[in-house]
Image (tube, rainbow, N blue to C red):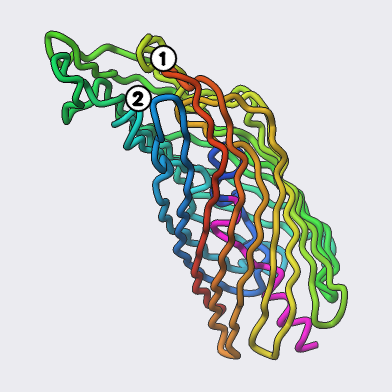
Amino acid sequence: MKSLKALFYASTVILAPSLSHAGGFDLTGQPISIIFEEGNYIEGSVGLVTADVEGTNALGNSGNIADDLTFLTFGAKTDITDWFSAAIIYDTPFQRETTYEAGPFTGTAADVEANTITAVGRLKFGENFSVYGGPRLQRARIDLQGPFARNPATGAFTPFSVFQIDVGDTAFGFVAGAAAEIPEYKIRAALTYNSAITHDVDTEETFFGPTGFVSVPSSFDLETPQSVNLDLQAPISKSTLVRANIRWVDWGGVNFSPPNFFNNPNFGGPVVEYTEDTFTYRLTVAQRINENFVGFVTGSYEADGGEEISLFKSVDGGISLGGGVIFESDEGLRLQLAGEYRWLEGTSGVQAGAAPPTSFDQADAVGLSFKVGYRF
């Protein structure tokens, strides 16, 4: 029984950076696994994703355009009655930061980010079936600047951007799901739906021209896509547990594009635009080492969706391999250290404006996370 207890800890493994640089600008995969924790539980984690994404064209190398990402997650869960429990989750499910430090788009940068607070309630119907769901509050923002201006006499870059916008909005969505399980053997199947969240933005886009800075009124939508997560887990022995995840994200049609930036002939184009949905497949195998330690290996696959290149869309699909270790004390303290390496598929084509075609042939990313939890 002790071995199954240890495997239960492994069954709630969350690899915070596991979906980094996959599926559009997916980051954490919107997990709600904390709602299945036993008793009262609280956790927090910190993550780092560092990537190398370089493009080449007739004018030279773009340098690494992928900025490092750091993020925090937090969750707390409690049993209100024997049949109803509740949790609150803070995370950053979508994030991407891109900066061009060389080439024709030098000085062009974008930071797209969505932070969410999710409240989840779970209603149990006996030991084998439950439903769960709740509201989600999301703050989304785009911080975008266009390329540095050039001195017409020398061709050298000047230290200010031709275009600037920094805007955010708060909106609501929801999460809903159902689970079937056999708690005695730690067998579970859970299906979770995450709604799309649309942000209506009214702002001003700032351009630098012959007469100086000019602000132009602008309106556009920021939408984070709907998604479905299917999570399956089952032990294959008293000391080994297997967990599978399939994540579908409705990226097709998602477009974050301030209209005046989009229509500019020199650097215009969508900031973030996707035409294809994504399916990401993940398999994790956890092995009990002793009464307090569990080790695990994990891998994922996402097919190349045939996405076209743009200024801030340089990769499409890839595979990953990672692992980690979990320590759980008899007093309820849990520590988890995880890491993952991801091989990314690059894109190629004309990015924007009159620049020559660019090819992102090789790209990779490394994700690390450290989580602390406590059961009380």
x, y percentage for residue 313? Answer: 52, 31
Is residue 11 a member of the stretch shown in magenta? yes
The quadrant of the picture occupied by the C terminus is bottom right
Quick one: 338 or 73, which is closer to the camera? 338
In the rendered structure, find residue 74 and report the number of the disc placed on it.
none
User: Which residue does the numbered mark 2 point to in the structure image?
Assistant: 104
Q: Secondary structure under badge 1?
A: loop
x, y percentage for residue 201? Answer: 39, 23
Q: Secondary structure under badge 2?
A: loop
Compared to residue 309, the image places residue 120 above or below, namely below
Q: Amino acid at mark 2?
A: Pro
Q: Residue at x 68, y 28 (%)?
A: 306
How many marks on residues?
2
Compared to residue 177, the image places residue 346 above or below, namely above
Q: Residue at x 61, y 66 (%)?
A: 80
Q: Earlier in the sequence, mark 1 or mark 2?
A: 2
x, y percentage for residue 258? Answer: 40, 19
Q: Residue at x 15, y 19 (%)?
A: 154
User: Which residue does the numbered mark 1 point to in the structure image?
Assistant: 353
Start-end of magenta stretch: 1-19
